[in-house]
Amino acid sequence: MFYGEYKHTIDRKGRIILPAKFREAAKSNFIEKFFVTRGLDKCLFMFSEEEWRSQEQKFKAMSFTHQQSRVFNRIFFSGAVEIIPDRQGRILLPQYLKDDAGIKRDVLIVGVSNRIEIWAQDEWNKFYGNSRQSFEEIAEKLMES
């Protein structure tokens, strides 16, 4: 549903505009509300409400008696915020999420199928630079069957 990389700049009011392709995908799939939370690899995860509920069910099923489950759920859910883009597709992220992802001005918005990732441009550049070399190796390991 969400695919591609899009560079954006936070506007003077602190808003990020969602790429037109993502706004179109949301509209055609009747998505009005998103949830944004702390992601992995120093980015933010943004889910449609339906996908959020699906992920929430998976994480709620993890046993709270396991310490790693408690830690993950606390960090993941405590950072979550419900977001409804305005008519121009702009969203306002809380400062604590921007701080967590190192977002100051330049962002990269990445479509990863069922979610959107929001990256500080420099963090994305580091991640991509470090990961691109191993892409083929990772693909080979993941695709073995």
Image (cartoon, rainbow, N blue to C red):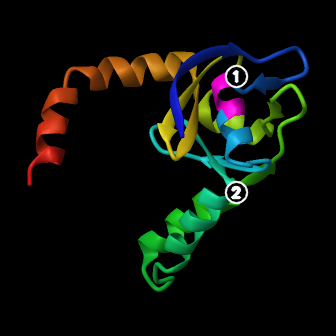
- Closer to the camera, 52 or 103? 52
Residue 107: x and y in percent read 63, 19
Instruction: Say which mark, if any, is on residue 20.
Output: 1
Q: Is residue 8 above or below residue 140?
A: above
Task: Please tell me which of labels 1 and 2 falls first in the chain.
Answer: 1
The main secondary structure of the magenta stretch is helix
Q: Is residue 105 above or below residue 140?
A: above
Q: Is residue 75 magenta?
A: no
Residue 140: x and y in percent read 11, 38
Residue range corresponding to the magenta coloring = 19-24
- Closer to the camera, 10 or 74? 10
Nearer the observer: mark 1 or 2; the answer is 1
**Label 2 crowd bin: few (<14), some (14–19), many (20+), radius 10 Å:** some
Instruction: Examine the image and state in which quarter residue 109 appears.
Output: top right
Instruction: Examine the image and state in which quarter residue 16 appears.
Output: top right
Residue 69: x and y in percent read 46, 72
* Real-space Cα separation, disc 1 to disc 2, in angstroms: 19 Å
Instruction: Examine the image and state in which quarter residue 56 appears.
Output: bottom right
The structure residue drawn at horizontal position 46% and vertical position 78%, both measured from the top left corner, is: 62
- Closer to the camera, 136 or 28? 28
Query: Three-letter amino acid code at disc 1?
Result: Ala
Secondary element under disc 1, as helix, strand or loop, is helix
Residue that extends furthest to the front in the rendered view of this protein: 28
Query: Three-letter amino acid code at disc 2?
Result: Glu
Secondary element under disc 2, as helix, strand or loop, is helix
Residue designated by label 2: 49
**Label 1 crowd bin: few (<14), some (14–19), many (20+), radius 10 Å:** few
Q: Is residue 32 above or below residue 59?
A: above
Position of the C terminus, as image quadrant, is: bottom left
Residue 106: x and y in percent read 66, 14
The structure residue drawn at horizontal position 54% and vertical position 40%, both measured from the top left corner, is: 1
Position of 133 with respect to 103 (left or right) is left
